[in-house]
Image: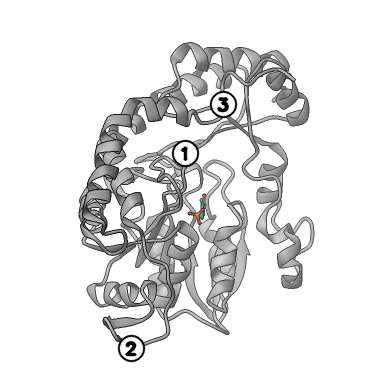
Amino acid sequence: MTEISIPLVNLHRQFLEVKDEIERGIAAVLASQKFIKGPAVRSFETAWLAAIGARHGSGCSNGTAALSIALEALGIGPGDEVVTSAHTFFATGEAIRHVGATPVFADIERASYTLDPTAVEAAITPRTRAILPVHIYGAAADMDTLSAIAARHGLKVVEDAAQAHLATLNGRFLGALGDAGCFSFYPGKNLGAYGDAGFIVVRDATVVDRVSRLIDHGRRSKYVHDIVGYNHRMDDLQAAVLEAKLAHLPAWTTRRRSLAALYDERLKAHGFKVLEPRAGSLPAYHLYVVETSNREDAMEAMRRQGIDTGVHYPVPLHRQPAFDGLGYGTGSLPVTETAADRVMSLPLCGSLTEDEAHRVCDAFLGTARP
Ligand SMILES: *Cc1c(COP(=O)(O)O)cnc(C)c1O
């Protein structure tokens, strides 16, 4: 086996860049001995809300919990339907199930890989209570059209922004555009903790109160529990890591965008389909995705040259065994299925060099066909 010299995400290199700040942040938490609901969590919550121009929100234990807590806080539960994308990580559908609701999968736009508003409107039934757009790869879903559809039908909008840190649409940050927006700080995400963490942004101050209770055992005060909640709190060590990294996130995001532009230019010149971001949007490029008709061969050839690649995601949610009971057959979401068959992810992160990006392109173009 060839040693991998270009991983999909180079967390080691990122660590060397932020080591001192992170160690200082962790040392401060250790000195305080406040690990849950302490000052580091409060400080990060304030910093993250400011970074994305949002007013209300709460840290939480992970991105999956962020989604299920957001849905529950907005009153979505058993018997309700939530229209979402199947071209996403499994957690999107899982979180809808966690609150007892039913995911209804609508097809995506080929250009951006995000929910197709026409398909969303066609999927609405009298039981629909929410639309859950996924800003997959950090690219904006069509929030204007989806929000207009939601308003027309009296639905909530919950954004899955787990891949969309600092991505914007018309100058506003994704995750701060819906009734709620959910972030993941899983280690490999654009802003990654050293363990699990997540965030729930909400538009309405009364909803954030419910969110805060749900993530902390439904607590009103130390010994009084108003509702049955969960243990889904963010912890202070993770908050300290996240706040240290947050200072670097704008530069890392800019770097991802310029590397994505380099990839775009080289791959489009050879006729490859790449992400086509919506007009007025700046993606976060959590992943750099290109389509190819001979994915297995291309991945194998690149691996032999020490370059790691991935597929996000080969099995769409409507074809997952866990969702068999929902009754979607092959062919029911044609655009989603085509994307799942053809997408592959190339190495991309804030610490990838241009030389490495060119090596990735050379290796890809040596084998892959459009
Ligand atoms: C990572 C991710 C999640 C889940 O986040 P966790 O923190 O791993 O629970 C949800 N949706 C999408 C699109 C993701 O990429």
Pick whichever of labels 3 and 2 is earlier in the sequence.
Answer: 3
Give, as a three-letter code, the residue at label 3.
Pro
The residue lying at 51 percent from left, 24 percent from top is: 264
Within-10-Å neighbours for mark 2: few <14, some 14–19, many 20+: few
Q: Secondary structure at mark 1?
A: loop
Label 1 CB sits under 8 Å from any ligand 1 atom = yes
Which-is-in-front pick, marks 1 and 2? 2
Within-10-Å neighbours for mark 1: few <14, some 14–19, many 20+: many
Q: How is the image coloured?
A: one colour
Give, as a three-letter code, the residue at label 2.
Asp
- Nearer to the camera, 27 or 2: 27
Which percent across, then down, holds residue 290? 60, 31
Residue receiving disc 2: 226
Give, as a three-letter code, the residue at label 1.
His
Point out the image quarter for the N terminus.
Answer: top right
The residue lying at 59 percent from left, 65 percent from top is: 94
Residue 186 as seen in the image, left or right of residue 280: right
Quarter holding residue 192:
top left
Residue receiving disc 3: 7
